């Protein structure tokens, strides 16, 4: 296994240390937060540590290992309550062999019950290894009834009983994208009235069962009610299509399983009232293999080690099961198709959800319980919230903008299920305050460039918004064809039809910023570089797309004004190191781009936020961490895992305030001088 005892102990120390402040502060050393307790009420709060509970729902055994790690392993190491529910048994063709002649040998007998059991054995071994360091750590296997009227297997790790596995054991599609009515896709679209179970050979569940569409939604919602998570992890319900035949970029079980999870979270939020708030994080699947590697080599190696355990690569009989101790189909290529080298989120990667309104007042936004929640900080430094805006179906992530006079607008995407499967779609919505510091008006829909789900699978990005001198919004969006679209508010308040701004191969959510001269900039990453749309003067149309010549990134992109230009922040592939470049608009059609420099901060993944010279993002250990622009290579790490992306704002007072949403679905903040020291994170509201 590539995780050495020393490295395992180091990770365990980072993620389970007590509430003593930031790790890099020496014992007895006064932190900047302590020195400013009298000035900052939040400084008196205890330092944030990882808290909350996590439920993951995936289609197949190994989807969690390929697409949700290292988030999964770090949650397990932290001692967080973690439950993973598997919708199908992943029985495939029933042949448990590594890739090669044996895997395609038609003479090899197919035994789906035993192959599915072998995959279960591999998952149990991998989770035991991630949680305890010992793949042979024992499990207790029992039967539980489901809210959908069926039965599920519940596995509890005896040494760490907060680690649970729930096996719903439905039949899988047995084809990545083929037309197989007996599947989650067929059940969702109404092609079959119910889907059969696929029991494994060793399961304590002995009686077969079936689920209708509604029963499966209830079964998943019942898992959520049993564990009452503060963070729900799921796969991507809206992958793109590609190629002339319009195939999906992901497995059909991943996509439609995620839609069942969406419906179940909505049902859970509506029906169960005495529960904690929860956030949702969705993960990119197969398309990871077509993008630059997002993880540094050590993290990718560690992740691959857990996949090797799952794949039963050493063939040692450590589980005592006649079905085998793992998934030998994965043994020939434990990294998958470049999946082990990356982790990417498909929502909540924007860093523009924290903003200043009237002087000294901050507003922060996130999706909780399928609604938009906001917190506000008074000029005196006291936070209040969360307050949930009316209206369900809001997707993870939000973007906030400041309107003239200090009013705030918030934008998001909303999923509508409709009365029939073909009516499922995503649309852009926004809400604004009627007066500064006042209440928000109702959600208003801007629609979507994707007219039907069947055509584009609603694979739109999160919106980015800019405000002109007259206070009117322009909203930018990446459509399902990976081009840039925009809609502009007219003098009468209505919005124009979605305009085509071009570009191709856009991968990231678009980002926008306005430079000191009032010129608007819009940027989006591609597989190999970054494209730009800029104004030559504040009163002229955007020009673009123009190549920037910037190198490939790991996809997430952040932008902030910097003098006469806009500074971009992104990560270097196969490294995770944060990089930056300054882009200025010129009289020519192509913007001027500075040389790329290292911003400080070593390794990690996901989007980074910036305010002044403060840079904030995930460190190698997955915790929220800070550094300074051009600062030391190492992050100043915290004790807290989080969900989504960080956001930061440079206030008029010269301080930088940063916020993240913890795994506990609580807002956590830190305020630091423009030259960052070693900030300590606190829960914003007691």
Image: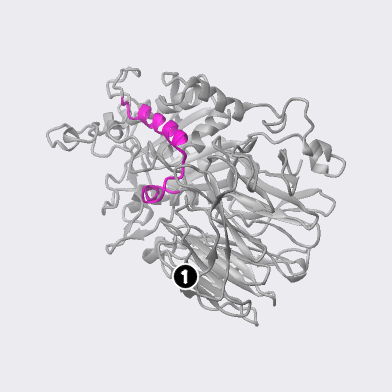
As drawn, which residue projects farthest toward the front?
A: 595
Quadrant location, the C terminus? top right
**As drawn, is 121 to the left or to the right of 497?**
left
Verify whether residue 297 appears in magenta: yes
Question: Which residue occupies 56% across, 76% down?
Answer: 587
Q: Secondary structure at mark 1?
A: strand
State the count of labels. Answer: 1
Which secondary structure type mostly characterizes the magenta part of the structure? helix
Q: Residues within 10 Å of mark 1 (few under 14, many from 20)?
A: many
**Quadrant housing residue 445:** bottom right
**As drawn, is 269 to the left or to the right of 107?**
right
**As drawn, is 490 to the left or to the right of 302?**
right
Horizontal and vertical percent for residue 449?
46, 70
* Of 660 and 109, the residue lying toward us: 660
Verify whether residue 354 appears in magenta: no
Quadrant location, the N terminus? top left
- Magenta-drawn segment: 284-313
Instruction: Name the residue tied to disc 1.
Output: 545
* Residue 268 in sight: no
Horizontal and vertical percent for residue 268?
55, 46
Question: Which residue occupies 59% across, 39% down?
Answer: 633
* Of 275 and 596, the residue lying toward us: 596
């Amino acid at each position: 296994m590539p995780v050495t005892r020393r490295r395992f102990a180091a990770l365990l120390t980072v993620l389970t240390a007590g509430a003593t402040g930031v790790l890099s502060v020496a014992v007895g050393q006064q932190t900047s937060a302590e020195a400013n307790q009298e000035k900052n009420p939040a400084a008196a709060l205890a330092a944030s540590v990882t808290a909350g509970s996590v439920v993951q729902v995936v289609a197949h055994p190994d989807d969690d290992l390929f697409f949700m790690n290292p988030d999964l392993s770090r949650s397990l190491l932290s001692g967080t309550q973690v439950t993973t529910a598997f919708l199908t048994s992943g029985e495939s063709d029933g042949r448990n062999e590594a890739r090669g002649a044996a895997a395609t040998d038609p003479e090899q007998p197919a035994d789906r019950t035993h192959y599915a059991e072998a995959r279960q054995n591999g998952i149990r071994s991998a989770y035991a290894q991630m949680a305890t360091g010992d793949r042979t750590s024992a499990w207790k296997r029992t039967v539980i009834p489901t809210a959908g009227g069926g039965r599920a297997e519940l596995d509890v790790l005896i040494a760490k009983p907060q680690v649970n596995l729930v096996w719903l054991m439905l039949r899988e599609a047995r084809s990545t994208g083929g037309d197989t009515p007996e599947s989650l896709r067929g059940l969702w679209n109404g092609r079959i009235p119910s889907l059969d179970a696929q029991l494994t050979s060793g399961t304590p569940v002995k009686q077969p069962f079936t689920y209708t569409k509604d029963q499966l939604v209830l079964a998943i919602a019942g898992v959520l009610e049993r564990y009452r998570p503060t963070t729900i992890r799921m796969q991507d319900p809206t992958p793109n299509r590609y190629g002339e035949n319009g195939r999906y970029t992901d497995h059909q079980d991943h996509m439609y399983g995620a839609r069942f999870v969406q419906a179940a979270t909505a049902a859970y939020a509506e029906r169960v009232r005495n529960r904690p708030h929860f956030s949702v994080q969705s993960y990119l699947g197969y398309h990871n293999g077509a993008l630059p590697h997002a993880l540094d080599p050590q993290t990718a190696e560690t992740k691959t080690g857990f996949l090797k355990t799952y794949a039963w690569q050493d063939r040692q009989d450590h589980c005592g099961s006649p079905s085998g101790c793992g998934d030998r189909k994965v043994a020939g290529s434990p990294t998958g198709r470049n999946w082990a080298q990356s982790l990417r989120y498909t929502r909540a990667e924007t860093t523009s959800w924290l903003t200043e309104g009237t002087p000294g007042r901050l507003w922060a936004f996130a999706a909780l319980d399928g609604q938009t929640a906001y917190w506000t900080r008074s000029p005196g430094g006291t936070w209040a919230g969360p307050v949930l805006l009316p209206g369900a179906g809001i997707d993870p992530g939000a973007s906030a903008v400041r309107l003239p006079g200090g009013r705030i607008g918030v934008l998001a995407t909303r999923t509508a299920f409709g009365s029939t499967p073909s009516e499922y779609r995503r649309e852009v919505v926004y809400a604004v305050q009627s007066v500064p510091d006042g209440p928000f008006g109702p959600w208003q829909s801007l629609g979507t460039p994707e007219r039907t789900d069947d055509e584009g699978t609603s694979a739109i990005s999160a919106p980015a918004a800019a405000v002109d001198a007259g206070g009117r919004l322009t909203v930018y969006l990446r459509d399902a064809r990976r081009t840039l679209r925009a809609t502009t508010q007219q003098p009468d308040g209505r919005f124009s039809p979605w305009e085509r701004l071009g570009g191709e191969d856009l991968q990231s959510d678009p980002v926008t910023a306005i430079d000191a001269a009032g010129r608007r900039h819009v940027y989006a990453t591609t597989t190999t570089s970054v494209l730009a749309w800029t104004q030559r003067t504040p009163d002229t149309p955007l020009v673009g797309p123009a190549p920037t010549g910037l190198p490939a990134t790991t996809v997430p992109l952040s932008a902030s004004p910097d003098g006469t230009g806009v500074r971009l922040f992104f990560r270097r592939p196969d490294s995770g190191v944060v990089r930056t470049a300054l882009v200025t608009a010129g009289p020519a059609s192509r913007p001027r781009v500075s040389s790329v420099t290292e911003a400080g901060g070593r390794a990690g993944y996901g989007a980074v936020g910036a305010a002044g010279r403060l840079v904030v993002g995930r460190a190698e250990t997955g915790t929220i961490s800070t550094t300074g622009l051009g600062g030391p290579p190492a992050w100043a790490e915290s004790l807290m895992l989080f969900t989504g992306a960080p956001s930061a704002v440079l206030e008029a007072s010269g301080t930088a305030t940063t916020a993240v949403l913890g795994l506990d679905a609580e807002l956590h903040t830190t305020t630091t001088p423009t030259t960052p020291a070693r900030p300590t994170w606190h829960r914003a509201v007691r």
